[in-house]
Structures are given as structure tokens and as C-alpha cells.
Image (spheres, rainbow, N blue to C red):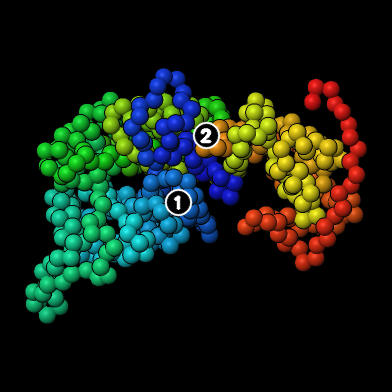
Amino acid sequence: MIEDTRYGSELSVAPPARPEHMTEVGNKRPTRRMDFSLFYFASAGAGECADKYRLLVEGAKFADTHGFSAVWTPERHFHEFGGLYPNPAVTSAALATVTERIQIRAGSVVLPLHDPLLVAEEWAVVDNLSNGRAAISFASGWHANDFVIAPENYAHRKEIMLRGIETIRRLWGGEKVRRRDGNGTDIEVRILPRPIQRELPIWVTAAGSPETFRLAGEVGAGLLTHLLNQDIDRLAEKIAVYRTAWRAGGHGPGGGHVTLMLHTFVGSSVDEVREKVRGPFSDYLRSSVDLWLARSPGQDIGDYTEEELEDLVSYAFDRYFETSGLFGTPDTCLQTIDRLRSIDVDEVACLIDFGIDFDSVPLILICVDLASATRPVISESGVFAVNMLADNQEYLSRCFATPSAERYEDFCHTGYHVAATGAPIIDSTLAFLDARVVAEYPGGDHVIFLGRVEAMGAAGQVRFVRGADREHATVVEHGTNGTEKAPLAYYLGQYRHLSESYQEPSLPTPTVYVHEGV
């Protein structure tokens, strides 16, 4: 779950497309790669908001540059659950213009609600906007209310979906289809613009019926599924059905592609995550209770008291948290990923937009050289601070870039104080981030530290302090002359100064102190 992509967020705490050389947890990990994608299904019941799609857009940008394989948006109609997404072609077109690498997928297009000719045409536009990154998972639909758009198709929706998939494949490949025009004349038409990809990557969405799993394999599609009405053991049996049907259909090498949707939030402790997600995720589940009940004949939300509904939501929350989601710490979530690998899941689509206030817990990534003396200190202490220097503090930046044995003398004249975590904050810094390490990953000749920001502030004020403990809040003061300063920037191999006027300060003659044990 992402909480603020400006700081590198919780969206990727369970590492996407995790390289197999990363530190193992427990027993030896399976060697097969697991892909990670983002899936959106936000409720539209949160009231009026001018920024409804911020998480969608910012999350997609983050995923595009952090190794995720795709971003999915659904098709939902006439209900607040998932109600921000009535048309995945529209949202996908928007995402295509702000990303460069990830695949842009519909999860799903309810094909019996649409003319396949229009679906192919719209997604050809998405394919062009994204330079060949469009993909679709097709669904037959299930809720009768959705079919006010095409009521005549409800009874035979699965057969109509399969015919529509074949039509879209033909149109995508450049073939024409015969249709009747306004004069009653049969004519042949094909789609424009021509798509970039020769073949449209497709999935079939399966809610739990083994028959749908089999059909997905037979038509040579990927499989998109979830754990709503099935557990992992039952899912394993159905994946086997899908793989068998795929191979029997002669669809080429491999055995298809299985994508599993999981609600996702990762933090530093299981208890912390549970309390963080309990309220918003319970509200999210509550918005869909009538849809769950509609799947069971004779069930109606009006038959339940408010207390019974609360019990139902509480039970659903516990089930999702314990067995049907990706909630917990990096270690516990990686154990879940290992189990999913073992049942032949290829990709986890992380559902992240279930109501968490994603501005509340910013995170930050830093990369530290393996040879640096700072690296083991951060690893052992579990904390670090980021200090933003002013444009007259270039000499300090150069000190930081100097091997540790040579820089102590230059640092002696620099005043600092200790933040709440114990990390050092330079007194004259423009701004700071005080962070606690939540994850550590190898990154070639560097180590990547993911830190949860405990406090951050600018000159003269604290802008954020994690939790209610402001007693130890760190306040950054202005310079000795009380004037504002511009930040120091390093760009294209040299220092840059954003202020209009700049004077190189003279380096003060240091007083050398010798500290025992240093």
C-alpha cells in the first residue's frame, strides 16, 4: 500500500519482482520469479473529493519506475464498491500518458455489456497511447443490475464473452467483421487506429468456478482470480485445471499465466499493520456486504440487524487479514509469497486503494555504498537522518563525500543535535527527515535502506511527528542571521545553486577534538 509516493512509499515494501539474490527468510526460497502489479478497486463512497484518482496516478508512476509489471483498473457500475472505475479504457488511457514501462491492463472488461467492435477500437487507442502496453482481462459479469446496459445478454453471458473474445482477437489482428449499417446494408469494417501489438494480451477473470478456470486455459488466456470464495488449497486445485487445459489447447510454450489479486499493506510489525488497516478496510468491506449477500439465494442485507452486519464485517476482516491478503511485515508477507509460488501463481496483483490515508506515513529510500563506514552503523542502529543542506554548505556536502578517516577533522566545527530516534540532525540544516529502517535490500555495490519517517521538519518548525509524542520533536532553526537560504543541489556531476546570488563560504579553521572510542 502506498501512503506517499513523494517519499518512496509503502506500496513496495514487499519488493516487486524480488530478485532471488536478496536476503532469504527462513528456509531456502523457491527459485521461480514472482511478478508484482498494482490493482485498483476503490469504493466511491468516501464523499466528494477533488483528488479521487491521486493514488491511481501517483501509484502508477511509482510502479513504472520500481519494477512492477502492470497496473490494473476494473469495470464497475451502479454501486459504490469499485465505483470509481466504470470504464477501464478511460483510466488506462490516462495512465498510458504518465508511464513508460509497465503494462496497462483492464481487470476486467465485462464483455457481454459491450459491442466487441467498440472494445477493440477503444483499446487500440490505449495501445497506441502506451506504445504497445495494453492488455485486457475479460469477465462475463455476475450482478444482474450491471446488465441494465444489455439485459438481453445476462442469461447467456459466458457464451457471449467467449464469442466476443474471438471477435476482438480477429479485429486486433487486422481482420474485418460484417455488420449492418444504418441503411440496413451488410458491410465489412475493421478497427482504427491500428494497434501497436500484433496480438492483444488477454486474461479471463475467474471468481471461483473450476469451469471458468478450464475455459481460460482452453482459449489460451491468462487467468485473473482472487481468494474471495476460495482458500489457497482450493485455488491450487483450480490452477492445475487451468494449466492442464492450457497445455491441452496447444497454445505454445509454457502453461499460461496466473495472476492473484490480494489486498496489500506492509509495515514494520503485524500488530501495527492490523490496527492501521482495521478501520478503513472494515469500512471498505462494509460497502460491499450487499454484493456478497446477493451471491447467495435468499440473502438480503435488510434481513440483518446492524449488530449482525458488524459481526459479519469483523469476521470478514479477520479472514482477509489472516489468510486472504498480503498484510504484515516483509518477512511474513514473503512467507505468503513463497506459498503462492508453490501452488503455481505467477503474479500477485496488489489491491492497495481500500481507504488507507496514504499521506499519513511517508517513507524514504536511501542508497548507501557497501564500502561506506556509514552502512553498518545504519544496519546496526536501525535509524538514519536525511539533512537538506543550504547552498552555502557545499563544504559539508564534500565532507560527507570524503572517506570517513579523512573527514573527522572537517566535521568537528559542525554543530548537531540528536533526533528522537538517536540519529544526528545538523543544526544549520534547511530541513530534515528522521527515519527508522523498516527494510534493507541489496542493490549491487550499494545497500538500499527503506525508512519510515518518524519526524520531518523545515527551518523553524516540525512538519510531521509520527504518533502523539511531540515532547522529543526536533525543531530546525534558521541560520545565525535569521535569513532564508536556498537548498544546495548536485546535478550532472557538479554543484548547482538555486538562489540567484551565491558566495562560496570560507572553510573555518577547525578545532580538533579527540574522543575516546572513536
Q: Determine crowd level at label 2: few under 14, some 14-19, many 20+ residues with C-alpha closer than 10 A.
A: some
Which residue reaches farthest top?
A: 27
Residue topped by disc 2: 442
Does residue 312 appear in this view?
A: no
Which residue is depicted at the point 48% across and 27% down? 23
What is the secondary structure assignment of the residue under circle 2? strand
Q: Determine crowd level at label 1: few under 14, some 14-19, many 20+ residues with C-alpha closer than 10 A.
A: many
How far across and down, in percent of the image, does residue 33 sit? Answer: 35, 35
Q: Is residue 508 left or right of residue 75?
A: right
Residue topped by disc 1: 64
Q: Is residue 504 left or right of residue 2?
A: right
Q: Nearer the viewer, residue 55 or 184?
A: 55
Which residue is depicted at the point 36% across and 54% down? 104
Which residue reaches farthest bottom?
A: 183
What is the secondary structure assignment of the residue under circle 1? helix
Looking at the picture, does residue 185 appear above or below residue 3? below
Cα–Cα span, label 1 and label 2? 20 Å
- Give the amino acid type for the residue marked by disc 2 in the picture: Pro
Q: Nearer the viewer, residue 288 or 11?
A: 11
- Give the amino acid type for the residue marked by disc 1 in the picture: Asp
